[in-house]
Image (cartoon, rainbow, N blue to C red):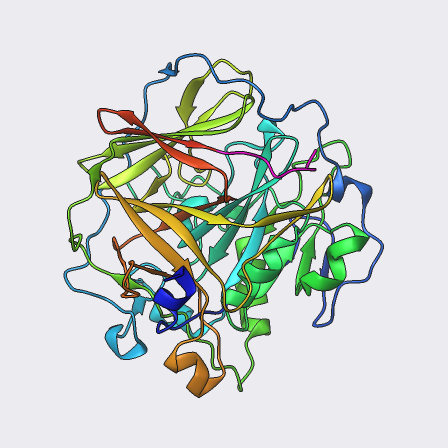
Amino acid sequence: MNIKTILFPVLILALVSSACSAVITQADQPVVENLQAAATVVPTALPTATAEPAPIMQSVEQSQPAQLISAPLTVGPNPSDVPAGYNPLTGLPVSDPSTLELPAVLISITNFPPSSRPQAGLSFSPWVFEIYIAEGMTRYLAAFYGDFPKTISADGQQDANQPPTAEVGPVRSGRLPYVYIRDFFQNSCLVYAGATYQIRARLRGCAMVFGDDSSNINSAMLDVTRLQKIAEQNKRPSDAFNYTGNLFNATPSEQGAPASLINVYYSLLNQGQWQYDTASGAYLKLTDFADGSGKFTPATDRLTGKQLAFANVVVLHTEHTVLNPYIIDVKMGPGETGKATIFRDGQKFEAFWTTINGEYEQTTGLRRPLRFVDANGKPFALKPGQTWVHIVTNPSEVQDQGSGQWKLRFYAPAGAK
């Protein structure tokens, strides 16, 4: 029995830009403007993955994040299963329920050059998608839905020494996989810093962000007050978006394989780690120095100074198609399924992702975010909290390194630079 037959009974899914102190362009129609060259500059010195890294040793003491809140009940997968004031993308309550009435805003955030790190705002995103963009590099598409980002001091309070509003970014150019992720989130708004002419018409972004310093490729930042305004302006009275579809439960439904450490290897100069922290019940993100040393430092959020901590780390396998060495498409439209490896609670589980329409989608005509299910097509329970999704090629592997350690070994699609 093939996987689509197994998963057919399940439901499905749905899936940006203002400027820092620079130029903001907004439109409801596909973007057709001539874009600044800086928006599509790609470093050329980064090689593809051709060699295994040296033995991995953490060289920097990691900071400890604040304790994650655990939801006291099961949340989802259906709209009636989500209590009022709970975010259906995290299974946790939000501090301001009115923000749930606004559509999601999806922002393209750079990971290269390394000078862009630490990025701002990722710790406030319910779901972050990491995609391959060529030359060994990856980029993030962060979904913002619910409470908006803000600067926070070490004691967890609004930082009086910081500006009254925060900025998210650095924002970078759009990529083809954003088309499918945007469509997961019905009525969402896509924000990016321009795009090549081959793909910009398909992106249908509602805003673009450009930097205010031509000598600094990382200068495109989105003010959170503008982020909120974009969400408000993108909401229409006829909107009926619904971001439910996934199940959240504080306790796994079964016992998985031990997974205290996940080594991530995209290329020699693009490596990372996820370390499970029993105190917070989350995976802590570490990043390398882009020097091939295999040494890591905590990946932090510049808005908080704290290490990124995610309740779920997902490896999502899907077909990649290279249109040219720098333009890579993925097969994640409606009616698709594929393998997924899900890490939660210090354990590894095998599951599947699906965008196959279920009863809700067939009845309403609305899409919802992609869902995770088990081999029987039943909802796979994510841990309440945020989710990081590595979108990888089908040949990529999750390798058992023993003693609860795993390695995500990415293999670039044929024809990619």
Residue at the far front: name it: 1
Residue stretch rendered in magenta on the structure:
410-417
Above or below 365: residue 70: above
Frontmost residue, 220 versus 195: 195
List x then y, in percent, for residue 276.
Answer: 26, 34
Q: Is residue 206 magenta?
A: no
Q: Is residue 411 magenta?
A: yes
Q: Quadrant of the N terminus?
A: bottom left
What's the residue at 22%, 51% (across, down)? 69
Q: Is residue 311 left or right of residue 52?
A: left
At a point 49% along the width and 63% down the height, the residue shown is 336
Position of residue 189 in the picture relative to residue 400 (left or right): right
Q: Quadrant of residue 123?
A: top left
Q: Relative to residue 197, is residue 283 drawn left or right? A: left
Can residue 222 be seen in the rendering of this structure?
Answer: yes
- Whole-percent x and y of residue 333? 56, 64
Q: Main secondary structure of the magenta part?
A: loop
